[in-house]
Image: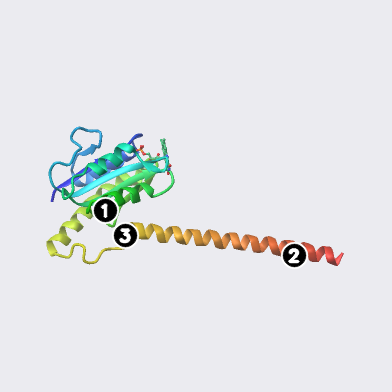
C-alpha cells in the first residue's frame, strides 16, 4: 500500500500533527509548499491536513486540493486544526469527495497546538487506521460496513450540545418567570 502525507500549516500546528502521523506510518510529511507536493504517482492512502483561517481553508490549500489529479488517490484520511470548530476537516473532506476520493470515516482533529497526549496516541492511531484499511481490502470487505463517519459523530455531538444548551436556557427562563411570578405574588400579598 502506498501511503503519503501532505499538509498545509501557517503556524506549525498542522505540521506537528503531520509529523506525529509520520512517526506512525513511517512516511515523510510534505508541506503543500514543497516542490515535491504534487501527487504524480498513484497513492492508496493519503493523509491530508490543513487548518482554518477566517472560516476558510488557506487559498493555497484550496488550490492544492483542486490540483490533485482525478484517479490518483484512492482513500483520504483527513486531519486538521482550528481554534474552535471541526470545519477544516469537513471542508477538506468535501473537496476530496467531490473528486471521487473515498473519505476514511475517521479523522484527526486538534484545537490549536497538538496536546502532549497526541504525541503518544496519534502515531499508533494512524498506523492502526492504515492496517485496518489494508485488512479490509485484503478481505474484500472494504467499504461494505462503513463505521459512523466522524462527520456524523460530530454532528450528533453538536446536536446533543445544542439541545442541552436549549434545555438549560428554557430552564433558566422558566426559573426567571417563576421568580417574577413569585415576586408578583409577594407584592400582591403585601
Ligand atoms: C489569520 C488566522 C485566522 C484564523 N481563523 C480561524 C477561524 O475562522 N476559525 C477557527 O476556528 N480558527 C481560526 N484560526 C485558528 C487556526 O485555525 C489554528 O490556530 C490552527 O491551529 C492553525 O494551524 P497552523 O498553526 O498549522 O497554521 C485562525 C488563525 C489565524 C492565524
Are there few (<14), some (14-19), or many (20+) residues within 10 Å of tag 1? some
Residue indicated by mark 2: 181
Q: Which residue, as the protein is rendered here, is positioned at the far right?
A: 190
Q: Residue at x 21, y 47 (%)?
A: 46
| Secondary structure under the numbered disc 1 in the rendered image | helix
> For the residue carrying disc 3, how many other residues have a C-alpha within 10 Å: few (<14), some (14-19), or many (20+)?
some
Residue 20 numbered tag: none
Q: Are marks 1 and 3 in contact (CB under 8 Å)?
A: no
Ligand 1 is found in the corner quadrant, namely top left
Residue in front for this viewpoint, 156 or 40: 40
Please tell me which residue is depicted at 29% across the width and 49% down the height of the picture. 95
List the residue tagged with mark 1. 97
- Which comes sooner in the sequence, label 2 or label 3? 3
Categorize mark 2 by other alpha carbons within 10 Å: few (<14), some (14-19), many (20+). few
Front of the two marks 1 and 3: 1
> Residue 155: x percent and y percent?
40, 59
Number of residue marks = 3
Q: CA distance from mark 1 to mark 2?
A: 55 Å
Q: Residue at x 52, y 61 (%)?
A: 164
On screen, residue 136 above or below 94? below
Mark 1 or mark 2: which is in front? 1
Q: Which mark is first along the chain, 3 or 1? A: 1
The numbered mark, 1 or 2, whose residue comes first in the sequence reads 1
Question: Is 95 drawn above or below residue 36 in the view shown?
Answer: below
Residue beneath disc 3: 149
What whole-number distance in Å separates the C-alpha atoms at marks 2 and 3? 47 Å
Please tell me in which quadrant of the rendered image residue 184 appears: bottom right
Whole-percent x, y for residue 10 in the image? 34, 34
Q: Quadrant of residue 57?
A: top left
- Percent coordinates x, y for residue 34 in the rendering: 22, 33
Q: In front here: 128 or 74?
A: 74
Amino acid at each position: 500500500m502506498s501511503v503519503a502525507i501532505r499538509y498545509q500549516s501557517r503556524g506549525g500546528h498542522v505540521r506537528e500533527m503531520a509529523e506525529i502521523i509520520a512517526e506512525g506510518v513511517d512516511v515523510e510529511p510534505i508541506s503543500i509548499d514543497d516542490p515535491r507536493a504534487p501527487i504524480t504517482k498513484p497513492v492508496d492512502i493519503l493523509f491530508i491536513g490543513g487548518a482554518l483561517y477566517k472560516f476558510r481553508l488557506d487559498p493555497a490549500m484550496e488550490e492544492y486540493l483542486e490540483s490533485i489529479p482525478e484517479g490518483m488517490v484512492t482513500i483520504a484520511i483527513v486531519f486538521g486544526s482550528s481554534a474552535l470548530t471541526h470545519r477544516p476537516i469537513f471542508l477538506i473532506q468535501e473537496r476530496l469527495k467531490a473528486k471521487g476520493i473515498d473519505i476514511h470515516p475517521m479523522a484527526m482533529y486538534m484545537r490549536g497546538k497538538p496536546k502532549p497526549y497526541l504525541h503518544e496516541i496519534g502515531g499508533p492511531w494512524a498506523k492502526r487506521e492504515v492496517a485496518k484499511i489494508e485488512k479490509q481490502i485484503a478481505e474484500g470487505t472494504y467499504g461494505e460496513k462503513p463505521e459512523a463517519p466522524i462527520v456524523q459523530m460530530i454532528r450528533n455531538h453538536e446536536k446533543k450540545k445544542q439541545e442541552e444548551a436549549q434545555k438549560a436556557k428554557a430552564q433558566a427562563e422558566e426559573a426567571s418567570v417563576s421568580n417574577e411570578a413569585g415576586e408578583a405574588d409577594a407584592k400582591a400579598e403585601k
